[in-house]
Amino acid sequence: MIDLHTTPTANGLKASIMLEETGFEYRVHKIALTRGEHLAPGYLAINPVGRIPTVVDQDTASGAPLTVYGTAAILLYLAEKSGKLLPADLEARARVFQWLGIIQADIGAAYTGQFVFNVLAPEPMPWAVEHYNALCLRLVAPIEQQLGKTRYIAGDEYTIADVLGYPLATVSMLRQPGNLDAYPNMRRWVAEVGARPAVQKGMTVGT
């Protein structure tokens, strides 16, 4: 059994999609960010960073529960544990790892800034809004270009790079610019990935 501590943000949905894809049994613990539950002592004892999602695997080789937090780390752990969605070939794995870094560290961080200054900021900061809006649009362009060359983000095989990218495209990108009209390759990819039963179910977890 795996315990998933989450909320239905783009980051949280990545973990629930992966759990559905791998087929592991799991139970959901909802974390209400608006009530500060991610900073409560009980949750910080599990994840000292105070972010979501977090998984606690109760079924490990050592017999001791294993806590994993950080979306990319969770996806990598579940892929290794299940033997799914991560190529065995070294070069193919390198391409997956490359896109994991781009999506999580570059694009994800840009959309976090965009959300902070467009949604959370108590007072408008036009420079910051313009900066992050432009940065988000610039950083998603390579994914659009890549999907014009390959079926999936890291190649012609569905991998954890697609699991990581799907909520970005269907949650974060639909907040700004608001649609995928300018991204025909991403629209094609979103339709294909979104038709997967595991993705459909994973996108409802925590809602």
Image: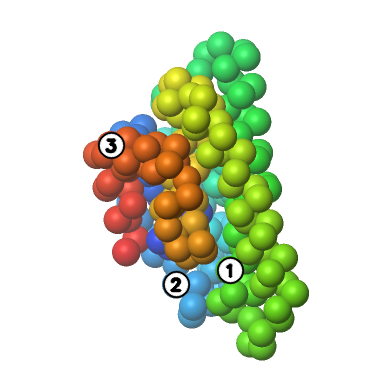
Q: Are marks 3 and 1 in contact (CB under 8 Å)?
A: no
The residue that mark 1 highlights is 115
Q: Does residue 88 appear left or right of residue 204 in this picture?
A: right
Query: CA–CA distance between discs 1 and 2?
Result: 17 Å
Going 63% across and 64% down the picture, which residue do you hit?
Answer: 133
Query: For numbered disc 3, what is the local secondary structure?
Result: loop
Give residue 32's mark.
Answer: 2
Please state which amino acid type lies under the numbered disc 3. Arg
Q: Does residue 83 appear left or right of residue 106 in this picture?
A: left
Tell me the quarter of the image containing the N terminus.
Answer: top left
Going 52% across and 13% down the picture, which residue do you hit?
Answer: 88
Query: CA–CA distance between discs 3 and 1?
Result: 28 Å
Is 124 situated above or below 32?
Answer: below
Q: Earlier in the sequence, mark 1 or mark 2?
A: 2
Please state which amino acid type lies under the numbered disc 1. Phe
Which mark is nearer the camera, 3 or 2? 3
Query: For numbered disc 1, what is the local secondary structure?
Result: helix
Going 59% across and 78% down the picture, which residue do you hit?
Answer: 120
Q: Earlier in the sequence, mark 3 or mark 2?
A: 2
Q: Is residue 81 visible?
A: no
Tell me the quarter of the image containing the C terminus.
Answer: bottom left
